[in-house]
């Protein structure tokens, strides 16, 4: 269950331009906050390079980054 007794979604997909910053951060935050049974993923519409900023920010927040690289 989510706060406020709303049922958790079954899956969430975060999309951004290159899956280099925004969507991987959103994926990591959602994985941390949602129940373990919720499928969470991120993707981009163009190939890009993973930005090391993502891991630095998530580490500061006490979270692990997502394991995959932008495709």
Image (cartoon, rainbow, N blue to C red):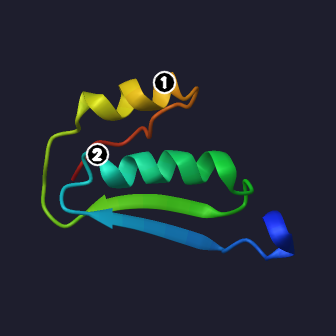
Q: Residue 21 carries which label?
A: 2
Mark 2, other Cα within 10 Å: few <14 / some 14–19 / many ≥20: some
Q: Locate the N terminus by quadrant.
A: bottom right
Left or right: 9 as drawn, with respect to 59 = right
Residue at image position (32%, 61%) is 43
Marks 1/2: CA–CA distance: 14 Å
Mark 1, other Cα within 10 Å: few <14 / some 14–19 / many ≥20: few
Report x, y in % for residue 37.
72, 60
Report x, y in % for residue 42.
39, 59
Residue at image position (58%, 71%) is 11
Residue 13 location, quadrant: bottom left
Q: Which mark is residue 17?
A: none
Element at label 2: loop
Left or right: 46 as drawn, with respect to 64 = left
Element at label 1: helix
Reply above or below: 53 against 19: above
Report x, y in % for residue 30.
57, 54
**Which residue matches tag 1?**
59
Reply above or below: 24 against 4: above
Q: Would residue 1 be visible to someone looking at this image?
A: no
Pick whichever of labels 1 and 2 is earlier in the sequence. 2
Residue at image position (80%, 64%) is 3
Left or right: 58 as drawn, with respect to 35 = left
Residue 16 location, quadrant: bottom left
């Amino acid at each position: 269950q989510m706060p406020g007794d709303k049922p958790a979604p079954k899956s969430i997909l975060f999309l951004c331009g290159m899956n280099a910053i925004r969507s991987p951060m959103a994926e990591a935050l959602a994985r941390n906050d949602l129940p373990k049974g919720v499928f969470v993923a991120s993707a981009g519409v163009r190939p890009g390079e993973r930005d090391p900023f993502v891991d630095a920010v998530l580490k500061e927040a006490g979270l692990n980054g997502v394991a995959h690289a932008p495709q």
